[in-house]
Image: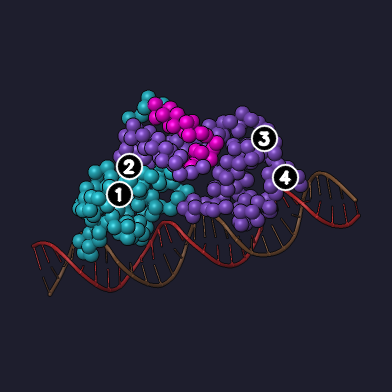
Chain colours: A purple, B cyan, C brown, D red
Amino acid sequence: MQFDDKVPIYYQIKNYLYHEMLTGQLTPGAKLPAIRQLAVDLTVNVNTVQRALGEMITAGIVTSKRGKGNFVTTDTARLAQLKEQLTMEQLERAYEQLHALNLTDDEIIAGLKQYIAQRGQQHD
Amino acid sequence: MQFDDKVPIYYQIKNYLYHEMLTGQLTPGAKLPAIRQLAVDLTVNVNTVQRALGEMITAGIVTSKRGKGNFVTTDTARLAQLKEQLTMEQLERAYEQLHALNLTDDEIIAGLKQYIAQRGQQHD
DNA sequence: TATAGTGTACTAGTAAAATATAACACTAGG
DNA sequence: CCTAGTGTTATATTTTACTAGTACACTATA
């Protein structure tokens, strides 16, 4: 995994795992990779993984069972809420940043459409 | 000024100053506030301001004149290019983040529109 | 020439993130 | 009971952003 050195690694790990849950790589109730395994996969220290998981546990997204492993919550409503929340956060941040660049609402929407269209020609 | 502690302060200062330039608070050729003054205004250390300015100077957006001050470039093409670049970076990041949350292209656009509409009712 | 205002540079110290390493606690299965 | 696999906790160390303080260099102006 590749990290952006502008933001803490533990924070990026959290987002990475959320992503896995929301795209179906990790379904509700699924067992997460072992902490030590995650640390190896992400070439990161165990404590750093632990810190990311700690916040997810606090947030009620992950359940920890000593000796067994970490599991995605089976509370699908909680997961849906998480997705909603993360989406909103992203939209808000993007909007504010673009607005700060002196773009109008319409320009922001047009810009996004154009970006997606352009991207469609190159990727996927 | 309020900082997000997830990203380096010097980086946020740079974005703040770019913002000032692109919204006309700082016009081409204008003199920036003195480094020490900026440090006071932003309640931040001189060196931190200096680091932000250093990158802007390297990028050719700001010209430094010893004993006189720092000035916004008069190269309006360079400023336009900066705006284009920053806009693209924001769009790309936002798109990728939302895509990672398992939203389709259409959902991303719809989500943004909805967010803006919603926001319009509350703000400004 | 003197002084105030400016940018530049250097050294030292602090705080937080991340690492390295190790020990401890629980669970399942032979 | 023992062992392998798991989560949990703790300590020391390294790295980096940031701060603090100081000194130096250049410019304009009285």
Helix, strand or loop for the magenta stretch, by majority: helix
Question: Which of B114/D25 is in front?
Answer: B114
Q: Secondary structure at mark 2?
A: loop
Residues at marks 4 and 2 touching, judged by CB atoms closer than 8 Å: no
Read off the chain for label 2.
A
Q: Residue B111 lies in magenta, yes or no?
A: yes
Q: Which residues are magenta?
A: B93-117
* Distance CA(mark 3)–CA(mark 2): 40 Å
Residue B21 placement (x, y as % from top left): 27, 47
Amino acid type shown at disc 2: Leu
Q: Earlier in the sequence, mark 4 or mark 2?
A: 4
Above or below: residue A55 compared with residue D1: above
Question: Which of B74/A39 is in front?
Answer: B74
Same chain, labels 4 and 2? yes
Q: Secondary structure at mark 1?
A: helix
Which residue does the image show at 22% across and 48% down from the upper left? Answer: B27
* Distance CA(mark 1)–CA(mark 4): 50 Å
- Please tell me the numbered disc located at residue A69: 4
Of badges 4 and 2, nearer the viewer stands: 2
State whether residue A47 appears in this view: no
Which residue does the image show at 24% across and 44% down from the upper left? Answer: B25
User: Which residue was labeled with disc 2?
Assistant: A101
User: Which residue was labeled with disc 1?
Assistant: B81
**For the residue carrying disc 3, how many other residues have a C-alpha within 10 Å: few (<14), some (14-19), or many (20+)?**
some
Read off the chain for label 3.
A
* Distance CA(mark 4)–CA(mark 2): 45 Å
User: Which residue was labeled with disc 3?
Assistant: A28
